Amino acid sequence: MSKKNKEIIYNDFKPDFSILINIFQELKKYIKEKKEKDEINEFTFDWSNNNLSLLMTKCILNYYFDIKYYSIPNNFLIPPVPSRLNYLNTINTLLTSYNALNNNNKQNNVIGIDIGTGANLIYPLLGYSLYKWIFICSEINNDAYENAKTIITNNKLEENIKLIKQKYKNLIFVGIINKEEKYFFTMCNPPYYDYEEEIKKEDKNRDCQYNFDEIYYKNGEIGFFDEYFEESICYKKNVFLFTILIGKKTNVQIILDKISNDKNIKFYDMKRIQTGNNMRYIIYWSFFNNFKEFNECILFSKEYYNFIPIIEE
């Protein structure tokens, strides 16, 4: 990857379609319109076509990130790369601002946790390719788990990405976080919709493929956050920075208010990330004042050993 390409990816990533079309000829059949503006070719694609969405993601991962094998089964979400990069780049900025990274924003022992990595495994692939971070990933859906495992194996990333099958439907960090280990961050793009209230309304309007486990959760983002946050308290000494991506603006203040009520939180805030017309909100918190304090803390305590999770089969 050239220095210029790296600079593009670190900042506001926009794939160069002219380059991609020239290298990957199969993209040409999905072009709806081509026009030249200021000596630059601009293309309009038929983005409603799932075949194009997957093909474009494959081409971007191949050219910009050296991911040679990539496949997603039918009925699973196809991730747009720019928005996923925005989340990772924001985490990198936060880790840097709290002195968790060194050597020009690189540190070889950075370990992050991706909760609900999905069949697409997109965050670990991008995070390792761009920053050389090591990832622990969880997935509860059997088909998604098997596909993610295939992506890891075919790209020979077993030493860099560890995939764990989450056995417990209503738990998040239990069985994923090793109580004897420390992690730099957690990240999660939780299910967006409340099944009870929104499934019928949204199902008939959606024209993209998806899997039930990817987009629906009881009480939606708020329900998922509540469990995520409660378990973060139980594992507060294991992780420096807990983060979660929120899609609904109406949920942001509710979540921030809940975090502010915990007196053990040392800092928390929200970052807006915009990709095209889509606005998302990264909410983050820590039980440490800074990374040095986290790095020096002793993991085990009576409080920790007294923690017994409620496990529902």
Image (tube, rainbow, N blue to C red):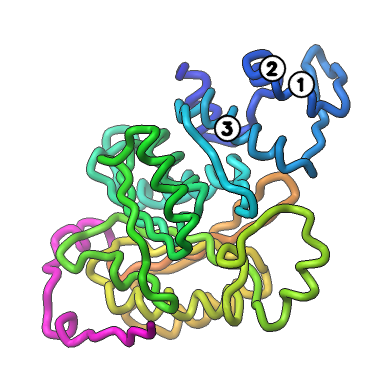
Residue 193: image x %, image y %?
A: 65, 72
Q: What residue appears at the point 79 percent right and 24 percent down from the top-left corner? A: 29
Q: Is residue 185 above or below residue 302?
A: above
Magenta span includes 311: yes
Tell me the residue that label 2 is attached to. Answer: 25
Tell me the residue that label 3 is attached to. Answer: 58
Of 49 and 103, the residue lying toward us:
49
Q: Amino acid at mark 2?
A: Gln
- Which quarter of the rendered picture does the C terminus lie within? bottom left
| Observer able to see residue 246 | yes
Q: Which mark is residue 62?
A: none
Q: What residue appears at the point 31 percent right and 73 percent down from the top-left corner? A: 174
Residue 118: image x %, image y %?
A: 50, 55
Q: Is residue 241 above or below residue 235?
A: above
| Element on which disc 2 rests | helix
Query: In the rendered view, does 18 fall on the left or right side of 222?
Result: right
Magenta span includes 286: no
Query: In the rendered view, does 306 fall on the left or right side of 112?
Result: left
| Element on which disc 3 rests | helix
Residue 116: image x %, image y %?
A: 46, 61
Tell me the residue that label 1 is attached to. Answer: 28
Magenta segment boundaries in residue numbering? 289-313
Residue 269: image x %, image y %?
A: 48, 66
Of 59 and 230, the residue lying toward us:
59
